[in-house]
Amino acid sequence: MRRVFVDPEAPQRDALQEAAKWIRIGGLVALPTDTLYGLAADPFSADAVARLCAVKGRAEGRPLPLIAADADQIAARLGALPPAGARLAAKFWPGPLTLLIPAPLALAPGVTGGTGRVGVRVPAHDIARAICRAADGPITATSANRSGQPATADPGEVERALGDDIDLLIDTGPTRGGPPSTIVDVNGAAPRLVRVGAVSWEDIQAWLGE
């Protein structure tokens, strides 16, 4: 594994391009998000997704969350957000709100866990969004740890846990941690809370006027 130290205030373009290159060719990249470190792979590559699950020791059938550069990238690669999703995105993105939306057939089956849906968000982290932009599409952002072990905000812990099995670690120092993203299903007639997280359900309902 190669570990690249990146200044979050002035990121080296070469480092972001290297991360995107590894993702595009089926590699695994650990990177910071606005909560914890995540493990990035190409969600459209079945081989890359299978490798990610093997490295984590993750059971089959568990969906993988995605992150994207912005709502336009999501629309271009995953499909238009449902109306309620678009309203929530306009208020809470970039930020720790994951929206469950219909999954396009082009996604690797392991991403959806057979649900027909995929969770995606735009993180409030410049480096994570820049790597999505350089990779030209959404990427996975499951926690960078072995399944059953705690997720981490410490890049040193990522290297200790996964360094032998991933290709690149983008190290911007510790992330801020905190609660995970809130997950809301926006497929039905009314949005449905799936997981409580950093954005309160009360704030979501208030914004939607419910």
Image (cartoon, grey):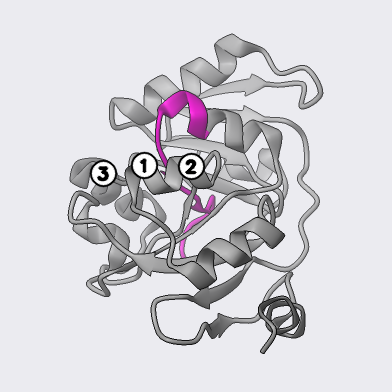
- Reply yes or no: does residue 9 show up in magenta: no
The amino acid pointed to by label 1 is: Ala
Badge 3 crowding class, 10 Å Cα cut-off, few under 14, some 14 to 19, many 20 or more, is: many
Do the residues under discs 3 and 1 have CB atoms within 8 angstroms?
no
First reached walking from the N terminus: tag 2 or tag 3: 3
Judge left or right: residue 156 versus residue 85.
right
Q: Secondary structure at mark 2?
A: helix
Residue behind mark 1: 76
Residue behind mark 2: 72
The amino acid pointed to by label 2 is: Asp
Badge 1 crowding class, 10 Å Cα cut-off, few under 14, some 14 to 19, many 20 or more, is: few
Figure quadrant of the C terminus: bottom right
Magenta highlight range: 132-149
Q: Residue 40 at what x, y percent from top left?
A: 45, 41
Judge left or right: residue 197 versus residue 31.
right
**Which quadrant of the view contains residue 91?**
bottom right
Badge 2 crowding class, 10 Å Cα cut-off, few under 14, some 14 to 19, many 20 or more, is: few
| Numbered label attached to residue 44 | 3
Do the residues under discs 1 and 2 have CB atoms within 8 angstroms?
yes
Picture residue at 66% right of the left edge, 79% below the top? 208
Q: CA distance from mark 3 to mark 1?
A: 14 Å
